[in-house]
Image (cartoon, grey):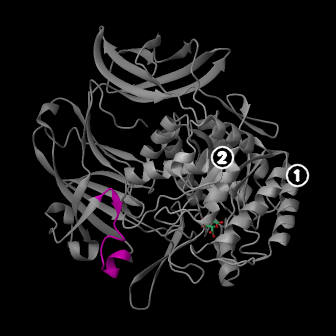
Amino acid sequence: MLSTRTTPTRDVVSLDGLWRFALDTTAGPEPWTSRIPATLEAPVPASYNDLFVDPAIRDHVGVVWYQREVRVPRGWAGERVVLRFGSVTHAAQVYVDDTLVAEHVGGYTPFEADLTDVVAAGQEFRLTVAVDNRLTNITIPPGSVDTLPDGRLKQSYFHDFYNYAGIARSVKLASTPRAHVSDITVVTGIDGTSGTVDYTVEAAGTDGHDVRLRVLDEDGVTVATAEGETGSIRIDDVRLWQPGAAYLYDLVVELTRDGELVDSYTLPFGVRTVEVRGTQFLINGEPFYFTGFGKHEDTPVRGKGHDDAYLVHDFQLLDWTGANSFRTSHYPYAEEVLDFADRHGIVVVDETAAVGLNLGVQGGLTGIPPTPTFAEENFGGETKNVHAQHLRELIARDKNHPSVVMWSIANEPASNEEGARGYFEPLVDLARDLDPTRPLTYAAVMFANPTNDTIADLFDVLSINRYYGWYVFTGDLATAESVLEQELRGWVQRFGKPIMMSEYGADTQPGLHSVWDMPWTEEYQTDLLAAYHRVFDRIPEFVGEHIWNFADFMTGPGIHRVDGNKKGVFTRDRKPKGAAFSLRGRWRGLEGRKPGSAHAGDPAATDAAATEGTAS
Ligand code: GCB
């Protein structure tokens, strides 16, 4: 699915800003048929939960309404008009005046509505969106909704991050010609000093057209051309997209008829390869070692609302620590984030929203005996179908991003349980079918170990989440270190694949200190990470380390969380904890606190970071 851009034949109008907002309990019946009172207004993009002081809004389970008026630019007569939502969490119904124009389930992928036949250039229409935040056993991520004795609905879910909801990404109204480029796929390769670009162009709304393509370098110089809907383009003396040294070309795709331009779309892309060979993860044929974090889209007040200021600042902090990558734990992030990663050479492990397919975790924490996760009444065939659809939407959206080097199909599924293989095998096949070029992984939960895991052989990279020294062997780093090493070696021995740590860390209250191994102190976080790093450095098959988490983040209520999850190396407002400085020491070979003391361009820093980063 192409993202929305202005081109010589396409215009875009942003619909971000304040929309009227109401709970379904106050909006009245069929709110799309009239104006919702402007008592409450909510910004788009933002989650709505933390905006208002009323707990009935924050804790609302079910539908809320967003509404605004939109005028179609008068110059758009004769054009196709498309409405595009970056995401609506978790389900949406979209009305233009009284007409239902789109329905979408899945809170982290985009969708469009073709409005060509229901709106007119120069005219205004009322746009109303029903947003449903409910998670059930047939949503991804899953959850369950119960009715309390007083009649209120209660939402439960199997992940710890807060279930923020709303219109958290940008909304756009776009024009395209009726005959238009509807999709482009590029797969790049390297042949000596040349780059190869295998491409496919899809068009819609046309009964006859030609396709011509140009590749422009970063100076706007045409370096290659081609014709036809599919083909291969060769770029001589190619500049590769590399981690830490991004280089993007523009693929200008033009639809023509009788030599006249009909539609034009520009796709930025990078030439790079990704491959798992033996126990190595190769980018452009070179071994790559992941340094970085699992992140969240999470900020005060906005919740999961996309914010360009936090985007820029977070990437500054990634660079400052020497992180070369992150995982989009635990759902696809806003497209702006991937575009930014493409432009700045940060490597991304792109994860689906399949977090919490694991009833054993719930059983473990509450003492409730676990029920079989993949039983039909829990997460069975229908859940798998929804998961498959989500995977299709993710790959359709992100397939052309050079920064995305691997798909993570799920976080902490019950891969040790019977039924896991039957659930995951078709999803792995589907992912390989949709994208044969990128390796696959999933993040393995504590209960799944080298002996009882039933699915790891289906994947290319072992990604392991472990909390030795935190949830188990709490305060005992010596035991944590030896148990971790034994287990990681067990995974390598059984599966013979590259292995990385996709989560490890400790909740840390900034300002808390101790000379002893005291959980929650800044020193304990630093020391726990150091113990893990010693283990990684002793295992030759290790290809990466992603700490949990980049920053503190909001969670649902729970006695083991104090104002959210505090495993951030940065606080929720992005202040460094002590561990940030030691990471900088490991990943960049630098100590110190002044941002000016080491930049990406500092050769000494880059050399040191490279040496550190590839040590294993
Ligand atoms: C995990 C989950 C992550 C949690 C983390 C924790 O294993 O994957 O979503 O936030 O543990 O801190 O408990």
Q: Going 72% across and 68% down the picture, which residue do you hit?
A: 467
Q: Which residue is mark 2?
A: 588
For label 1, the residue is 494
Residue appearing at x 42%, y 16% in the figure: 213
* Residue 326 % position (x, y): 59, 49
Quadrant of residue 407 within the rendered picture: top right
Query: Counting other residues with Cα less than 10 Å from the Cα at mark 2, is it few (<14), some (14-19), or many (20 or more)?
Result: many
Where residue 145 sits: x, y (%)?
A: 47, 76
334 vs 261, left or right, is: right
**Cα distance in 3D space between marks 2 and 1:** 33 Å
Q: Residue furthest bottom?
A: 149
- Asked if residue 349 is positioned above or below residue 275 in the image, the reply reads below
Give the image quadrant in which the ligand numbered 1 is located. Answer: bottom right
Instruction: Assess whether residue 109 is covered by the magenta stretch.
Output: no
Q: Amino acid at mark 2?
A: Arg
Viewer-side label of 2, 1:
2
Q: Secondary structure at mark 2?
A: helix
Horizontal side, residue 217 vs residue 587: left or right: left
- Disc 1 residue crowd, few under 14, some 14–19, many 20+, Cα 10 Å: few
Q: Earlier in the sequence, mark 2 or mark 1?
A: 1
Question: Is 173 displayed left or right of 575 in the figure?
Answer: left
Tell me if 248 is positioned left or right of 46 in this view.
Answer: right
Q: Which residue shows up at 11% across the image and 47% down it?
A: 124
Type of the residue with mark 1: Arg
Q: Is mark 2 within 8 Å of ligand 1?
A: no
Judging depth in this view, the residue of 296 and 552 nearest the camera is 552
- Mark 2 touching mark 1, by CB under 8 A? no
**What label does residue 94 carry, if any?**
none
Q: Residue at x 65, y 67 (%)?
A: 358
Q: Which quadrant holds residue 529?
A: bottom right
Q: Secondary structure at mark 1?
A: helix
Q: Which residues are magenta?
A: 44-58
